[in-house]
Image (cartoon, rainbow, N blue to C red):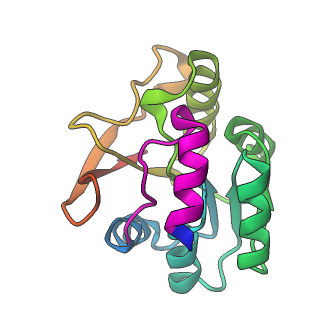
Amino acid sequence: MEPGLFLRHALRRPTAFGSLLPSSRHLAQAMTAQTRGAQLLVELGAGTGAVTRVLRLHHPDVPLVAVEAQPHLARHLRERFTGVDVRAQWAHEVVDALQHHAPSLTVVVSSLPFRTLPAEVLDRTVRSLCRFLSADPLRRLVQYTYQPRPPFDLPHSADSRGLGWRRVKTIWRNAPPAGVWVLQ
C-alpha cells in the first residue's frame, strides 16, 4: 500500500518528489544510523513514512516532528504514527519555529528533493537549515541524494559559515542508489 500511495502522489506532483518509489528500508536504516544521541528528531519530507517508521523503531522515546507539506500525506502519517508530531507545513516554517527552542542534539533527517525544488522554496529551505545548524555545533542534517555531489550547495553567507558536507555512505540497495550525507 505504501508504494502505491507514494506513486500516486509522485505522479501528480513530480517536482515535489525525487523518485517514483519511497526510500528503501536500507536507505532509511543508513539515515537512522546517523541520528545516534539525538534529543529531538525532525524529519523533513516525511512522505508516506518509510523513514519515519525506522526512526520510531530505533528511537521510540525521542520526540519526533515529521514535516510533510502535502496535506493528504500528512493525514496518512498522523493515522499511521500516533505519538509523532506531524506538521503539514513547509520545511522552512517548522525549522524556523524550532530555531530557539530545539535542544542542542537535534538531528534533522531529510528526504526533500533539493535539486528539483522550485528556486524560491529551495532558497528559503536552505537558508533556514543553515541558520538552524549554525546556531549549535551539535545539530546536524542527514540528507540523501541520488547524485554524486552534496544534496545542495551552501549559500555564501553568514548563515552557512563553518558548515560542511560529509558523505557517509552509498546505499546500492535503493532504487535508484543513494548517497547519505551529513551537514554539520
Q: How many marks?
A: 0
Q: Is residue 102 visible?
A: no
Picture residue at 38% right of the left edge, 73% below the top: 25
In the image, residue 93 lies at what x, y percent?
77, 38
Residue drawn at the location 49% of the way across and 26% of the way down: 160
Q: Is residue 103 above or below residue 113?
A: below
Answer whether residue 46 is visible to the viewer in this image: yes
For this view, does 68 lie left or right of residue 107? right
Question: Is 97 placed above or below 32 here?
Answer: above
Please identify the quarter of the rendering in which residue 118 is found. Answer: top right
Snapshot quadrant of residue 27: bottom left
Q: Nearer the viewer, residue 4 or 148?
A: 4
Report if residue 19 lies within the magenta region: yes
The residue depicted at 42 percent of the width and 57 percent of the height is 21
Magenta residues span 3-24
In the rendering, at what x and y percent does residue 36 appear?
45, 73
Does 134 lie within the magenta span? no
Residue 5: x and y in percent read 60, 62
The percent coordinates of residue 75 (x first, y second) are: 80, 63
Q: Nearer the viewer, residue 92 or 135?
A: 92
The residue lying at 65 percent from left, 77 percent from top is 62
Quick one: quadrant of the N terminus?
Answer: bottom right
